[in-house]
Structure formats: structure tokens, C-alpha cells
Image (tube, rainbow, N blue to C red):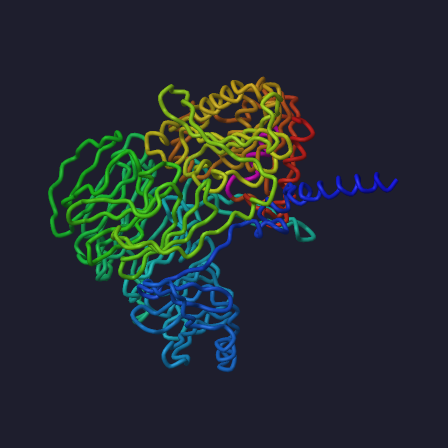
Amino acid sequence: MKKLSIILGTICMMALPAMAQEKKTLTLEELILGGNRNFSLQPEYVFTTWWGDKPVITDVESASVINLKNGEQTTILTLEPLKKLIKDEGLGNLSHLMSVEFVKGQNKAILQTNTHTVIYDLDKKNITESYPLVLGVQNRTPQPNGYNSAYTKGNNLYVMWDGKEHQVTNDPEGWLCGQSVHRNEFGINNGIFWSPKGNLVAFYRMDQSMVTDYPQVNTSTRISTLVPDKYPMAGMTSHKVYVGIHNPATQKTIYLKTADPTDRYFTNISWSPDEKNIFIIELNRDQNHAELIQYNSETGEKIATLYEETHPKYVEPEYPLTFLPWDDSKFIYQTQREGYNHLFLMDLNQPQQGIWKDCSAGGKCLEKLKTTQLTKGNWLVKEIVGFNSSTKELIGTSTEVSPLQSNPFALNLTNGKHRLIGFLNANHSISLSESGKYIIDNYTSANIARNIDIVSTNGKGKTMNLLTASNPMDQYNLPKPEIGTIKAADGVTDLYYRITKPSDFDPNKKYPAVIYVYGGPHAQMITNTRNYGASGWDIYMANHGYVVFTLDNRGSSNRGLLFENCTFRNLGTEEMKDQMKGVEFLKSTGFVDPDRIGVHGWSFGGFMTTNLMLTYNDIFKVGVAGGPVINWALYEVMYGERYMDTPESNPEGYKGNNLTLRAGDLKGKLQIIIGANDPVCVPQHTMSFLRACIDAGTQPDFFTYPGDEHNMRGRDRVHLYTRITQYFEDYLK
């Protein structure tokens, strides 16, 4: 008996290390944004900012300057004494120092409390100025290099100037001022534009009174109430936009004397450095003719048309002008006219007659200023970050290394020389010091959880590492996503795919496969980031016995204009052909069960999911379509008409991708999920499809989230993915 006890004890001791090393399998709560433990799975992070050319690390309790020579940190701000000082002055509560900023050229910090902007003198250790925040407002936009601000209340624009608030506009119902227009297309994401010195503020003013109301419904009241939303559908009457310029010192407002705003888009508002001129890239409703127009900011008069560009499909301006800090007469214009987004230098001091000329991407352009192309190649510029004036260099990011990532580069505007900055095989996000001599480089890749470095932009200085984060997910039982390429349906174009297999993958088994699809413009699913961009849900499903596959088909982002616009007037057609090449690849692996293939996507991906279920109904057994476009004639004017033209001019295209007409083709199990108050893909899409299915005798499933819009957030998102997962478990597993 004693001998047996010894043997059992030995076995138990041998098992202990194995048990200690056993990795945990993650839950949806841990993998989905909104789950109780999701944030803890992100790699370690440090908050950083610049104080001139001094890098600063900030956190809740302190802010510390980093010595660029030896890496030593010196604390310059500490929360508790600042918190007491600010409270004693009656200036609100300072809860952390993570968002501290610094006054340009001064030893002063800008602190945000819950009620004030506070200016703290780092030398004298006292508060020199404070500015009250107006609470309960929207779209607050601070004055550059100052402490005033512009914001909106309801539909109107207000300015806080020298501690006094005044109302700029007083428009009736149906108008919006100081807010984003054109439904956030063309790179527009705000409606207030301070001039460079902060003396003037330009703003959008939009008349929506002629636009049809879409009847959204609030079901949280005892009797549901109507909440109308101005929603111009493709081919219908759209809104009119005006551009105002307000002088807060004189409280006078003028409006630019633009062309008739009917069926015209006013995009990418830019100021000249001297504030005397304002520039707008204007676009016709067909979105195939862009004009760069200069206006006088004092009178609103049009001065000149500086550049024009046309394309038989569409022109898509998305970036405002960027003026050179050392020469106010020169600016950089971004365009895809040569097939990829590239930089062109234009000179206001060298006007020319200009002649229309052909561009390599199939359009035409007319240059009325001397124009020099700065970047070129089968890659695109993603962002202009700033300049190093001493070396006359532009600092930006591009896809030159790979379309799967963004890399910093420096471009010498004197000699045209161009060089990459920092570690090559990673995806970078950078911030530039005041002089442009250094960047704080935050980067990640499939193999790097997160690194943060300080890097000299001249390519010669020594790199200083601020953080090398460990991957907190290494302690868990996780699959390893893989990427590769296959040929598109055109037989020529390489497409990137990502495949995620179970962590205990057995090549001799047959697995059910779920294709996660988006497929539309301005989105890219496969990137050189952690797990190659695989979502938490991809990881979860792979760990529950599925192969999860994603393909960036033609029509998606960061591969150039021709890659994207091949879907013009027939959204869904070429995209589905490419997705079926992905299905062929899955079948060829030998470990995917061809009788158990499912598909899931949201928004454009919901359209793709529904379309694939109807078009290839013998291939796809199960689908979950979220917030789907069902009929492009029901989608909004700007996006819909760019890629499809109007229903009147493209009846066959609209008919071909109107999924209600094919509701009878549904064979597999399809669940449609929407937010009941979706303002993007309005509920009418899904309701019309459900009606068509009833009439055709087919049986989709349907679930809605009352009060939610286009995406589910917080706990609703965990509920959503629990539901999606259960649907595949019930019908595909």
C-alpha cells in the first residue's frame, strides 16, 4: 500500500508542470470589444507627446521628459499637486495627465479638466490662464495656437471668443451648421475649419429642407415616436451645401460665392497660410469632374480654378491641400490620377494656360499652375504627417514596402530624393516633433506585439526604444493565422488572403469553414498587424473547430484606383467572382469540408453575404448578414452614385444587384441582423428583402437590436457575436 502511494505521488508531481503550462482558451467576453476583459488583452502601451523636440511620456499620475542622448526620464508634472492647485482655484477636476499638451515655443502645459482648459507655467509652477469649457455642446473645435473654440448647439454654430460666447448662425429646422456634410464622404469628418493663425473660422452650412425624411422610430417611449432622418437615396433630391467664413473679432460672416450648390459637392476645405484665401475641391454630382477653386476669404469672390481632373468612372478627392511651411506659394495636391494616391507640387506664383492631358489611370487633367509630380510608383501615399523645414523634407507614410502595411518615409523637396524610415517589416503610426527632426514611431506586425521607438528622420541618428511590449495573448491557447496570395478571377491580379485554423489543427480532418467577407471600397481586412488583422471572433471560431478565411477581393482598399474601380456600376459582381476563387482555394486544401462552408459579413459585407448565399446557393450552407445593403437604389446619394451612377442612368446595374429580385433563390440557412435604427443601411433594405422572401416562400431568419444603429457596441456587441456564433454552431458544425 505504501509503495502504491509513492507511485501515485510521483505521477501527480510529474503532471504538475504540464498542468501549469496548460494554456487557457479565450471566451467571447475576452475577445470581443465590449466584453468584460477585452482591454486586458491589448499589448502594453505608453502615451506619448512632443514638447517641441522633447519627447514626453504621459500616464495617469505623471508626465516625464525623455533625454534624447541617454534615455533618462525627468518628471515635469505630477498629478496630485496639480489636482489640488486646480481644485483650489475652482477650475474643476483634473483626473489624469495622459492627454497633456504643450504651448508651442513656451514652457507651459495645457491641461484639460472637466470644466476648463488650464495653462500651467512649468517654470513658475503656477496657473497663468484658464478658459471655461462650454458643456453640453457638440463638434467642439479648438482654435489653433489659442484657447478659443467653435462648436455647435443643436443645428447652429457658436464661437467662444475671449471668454464670451456668441451665436454665429440662427437657421430653422432642416438646416445644419458647423457639422460634417455630404454624409461623411470625400474625406469629410468635420464641419469647422479654423484658419492657420486662428483669426477666422470657416464652416459648412447645409440646407436639408428639400431632402426626403426617412422615418426612423424610437421604440423606447411608451408609444413609439417618429424620429425623421434626412436621407437622400440614389437618384433622389439631395441637400445643398454652403461655405461660410466668420470673423470672431468683428462677429461678421460672409459666404463664398460658389457655383449653384444644387447637385454639387464642396470637399477638402483648405486655408492659405496668410489666411487671405480659401480653397475647395468641388465635384459634380456624377463625381467624375473635380475642380480645385480658390476664393477670397474676405469677400467670398471666386479668384480662379487652379486644377481640373476628370475620369469616365469617378474622381474621389479625399485630402485637403498641404502648404509648404517655408514657401506660402507652394502646396501639395493628392490625387490618384496616375493610378495610386501620389503627391503633386503646385505653385501659385506660376500660373499657366494649361492643356487637357491624358493620365495613366484612364482620366484627364488640366493643370493651370506649374505642377511637379513628387512621388510615383505602384504604391500609394497614405498620409502627410509634416515637414522638416531645415532639410526641406516632407515626412509621410506609404505602402511602398507592402500594401499590407504603412511605412514612414522622408522626401526631399529640393532634390527629389526619397528614403524609408525605421523598421521595414511592420505597420507604423507616427507623430512628428515640432522641427520634424524626430518621430515617435508606434509599430506592430504579425510578429511584433507593439514597439514604440524614437527615430531620427535624417536616417542617421540612433534609434531609442521606449517600449517593447510582450504579447499578452501568448499565455493563451491560440491559433496562428497565416496569409498568402491567390489569383483573382481575372487570372492576373494577386489577392491577399488570411486563413485561421484551429490551434489543434489536424490536416487529416475535415473542418467546416466560415468566410468572413467585407469586400467593399475603403476597407482592407488583411494587414501586417497582430494576427494579420484577424478579429477576436476569427480566433474564437478557429478555437471552436472552424477554419476561418478572409480574402481582400478587387474593389477593396490600398491597392490603387484600377483595383478598386473595376467594380463600377456593378457592385458585387467582380467581388463575388474573386470570393469564389477563395472558395476554390479552400476546397483544394483537403482539410475543408466542401459541404460545410458558411459566410458572414457586415454592411457591404452583409450585402456580399446575402448575394453569395443567393448566387452560389449550392456552395454556401449557412450565412449571417449584418446591416446589409439589399437594393442600392435605397442607399444614399454620395456613396451609391459614385460606384453605381443613378438608377435612371444604370438600370441594368441596379437590377442586377437588387437582391429582393432573387429572394426565391435562397436555399441555405440565412440570418439577417440589423440595428433597428440603422441610419446607414436603413431598415427598409432588410424589410423589403423579408417581404420578398415571404412572397417567394423562402425562409430567412431575422434578429434586430432595438435602439442600435449600424453597429452594435458595448454589451450589445458581445450579445451579437454570441448569437452569430450560435447560428453557425446550430447549422454548420
691 magenta-colored: yes
721 magenta-colored: no
* Residue 646 image point, x, y percent: 40, 32
Describe residue 340's horizontal placement relative to residue 568 as left or right.
left
* Residue 267 image point, x, y percent: 33, 47
Instruction: Report the magenta residues as a range.
Output: 680-692
* Residue 256 image point, x, y percent: 28, 55
In front here: 245 or 733? 733
Residue drawn at the location 43% of the way across and 24% of the way down = 486
Q: Main secondary structure of the magenta part?
A: helix
Residue sticking out furthest to the front: 3
Describe residue 114's horizontal placement relative to residue 349 as left or right.
right
Is the residue 158 above or below the residue 212 in the image?
below
Q: Is residue 215 visible?
A: no
Is the residue 203 above or below the residue 573 in the image?
below
Residue drawn at the location 54% of the way across and 32% of the way down = 500
- The quadrant where residue 284 appears: top left
